[in-house]
Amino acid sequence: MRRIRQILQLHFEVHASARAIARELGVGRSTVQGYLARVTATDLVWPLPADMTNEMLEERLFPPASFKLGVRRYTEPDWASLVREMRRPGMSLMILWEEYQAVHPEGYGYSRFCELYRAFERRLSPTMRQTHVAGHKAFVDYSGKRVPIVDPVTGEVHLAEIFVAVLGASNLTYAEATWTQRLPDWIGAHVRMFRFYGAAPRLLVPDNLKSGVNKASFYDLEVNRTYGAMAAHYRVGVVPARSRKPKDKASVEAAVKFAQFYILGRLRNVTFFSLAECNTAITAAIERMNGREMRRLGVSRRQLFDAVERPAMQSLPDHDYEYADWHLARVGIDYHVEVAGFFYSVPHGLIREQVDTRATVRTVEVFHRGKLVAAHARRYGGPRHGTQPDHMPSAHRRYAEWSPERFQRQARAIGPNTEALIITVLAHRPHPEQGFRTCVGVLRLFRGIEAARAEAVCIYALEIGARSYQSVASILKHGLDRKASPQAADGTPIVHANIRGSGYFH
């Protein structure tokens, strides 16, 4: 603007020619002529008003191009429909421009076409401004707001979390309430989300929630094992949003905010007495939200999903993913592993080996070095041991190190009643190996105490039918044997020798 003011001064005060002004200021003659033409077109007079700033002069000489539809020179396409088309896989602005040129050959050139398209796209909501390929990504997260649910019996208020999922291209939104953000609720919400969409995207983009990501790192990402297994079941990848990169999850962040006021705002005066009741109301609100026409695009989320995104998504597997708990375990001396208080057999050759257990609602599976080595129906009651015959040794006495005879011999060294208790423990198991753990524990309890005291504890245990480690430990801890120890007439403890003659080990 300073140079333009010099040009005007030389032109109006000195009456210099354009050539002389160009030579004086070191600019092109056509440049000087162009500036003077703009001054003439704007009816500016010299000297310029004292209050005219450089910004005001620039606005007069170089007015911004108008973006109003009514003042554009050429026929324009339906920009909203082009935005929808850009969500289709493999689509580009070049293809859309070529189709526009085929109908309007006198229309805009490619660069101006792209400029106008971007200008329209900037006027969309922040959510729709994202460019996502149809069927490619689903963004998942928990809302920061929670919904209160009242216990109908006690009146206590519990706060439930709101899970929200958004597809990248169509913005079709799914939401539900779960009690927690822990792994079982997190996995269950995903399963129901896939069922709602009726298809699966190529990628899941979660926030760095601990239920989904064990280690958040750009280079060494570690996805939770159960979450990874669920993703593999649906053939989708997991690419968590980068920490402190809000643009990575802009779609779900905007959808979460929208869901908060659209769902929670409408339900703020409703009292819920169960999680199911709350989810019924959320489902109705989500259906209204997905069926509402988006102002700029002229279609609803559901219509955009059906037309653009659903055909590009993957089909679902034949059955839903079943949640499973994974744990590391070590095979015991009785070739059983413990899962939730019950014991399940594995091949006896894996004694003392480390294995992975996978427990679902119905089954317990055991893996050794990634290979399935045992599968059982899960137990919730009845006998604590589940033993498959083919997991057992060909002969129980084959392993001298751990055998019923060894435990009897160790117990006999303490006293006859201790031996009787050990025999009773083994005799009341379908297989003696299932009592090995209890025998080891009972004999360890008697280390460092007098044999007479151990015998008294065993007498009391036999009298009341106590055959577990916890029961014997409780008798010893609370001194119950000293309160009621039956004795013979000569003052010696009674020996329950009849158990030895049961013939169980013959």
Image (tube, grey):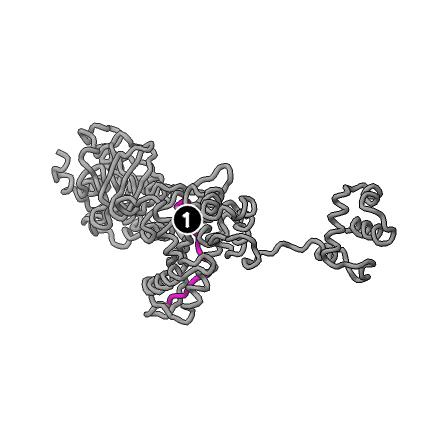
96 left or right of 408 in image? right
Q: Residues within 10 Å of mark 1 (few under 14, many from 20)?
A: many
Depth check, front residue: 504 or 17: 17
Q: Residue 238 in the image: state x and y as whole percent.
A: 42, 42
Residue 149 in sight here:
yes
Q: Is residue 466 magenta?
A: no
User: Given the current orientation, which residue lies at the most extreme bottom position?
Assistant: 269
88 left or right of 316 in image? right
154 left or right of 427 in image? right
Residue at (40%, 52%) from the top-left corner?
Answer: 182
Amino acid type for the residue under numbered disc 1: Ala
Residue 210 in sight here:
no
In this picture, is 100 found above or below 410?
A: below
Depth check, front residue: 318 or 421: 318
Depth check, front residue: 492 or 319: 319
In this picture, is 293 found above or below 90?
A: below
In terms of secondary structure, what is the magenta stretch mainly? strand
Secondary structure under the numbered disc 1 in the rendered image: strand
In this picture, is 430 found above or below 308?
A: above
Residue at (45%, 62%) from the top-left corner?
Answer: 260
Q: Residue 203 in the image: state x and y as whole percent.
A: 41, 43
For residue 395, which quarter of the picture? top left
Write down the region rendered in magenta: 135-149
Q: Which residue carries the number 1 mark?
A: 138
Q: Residue 95 in the image: state x and y as whole percent.
A: 46, 42
For residue 99, which quarter of the picture? top left
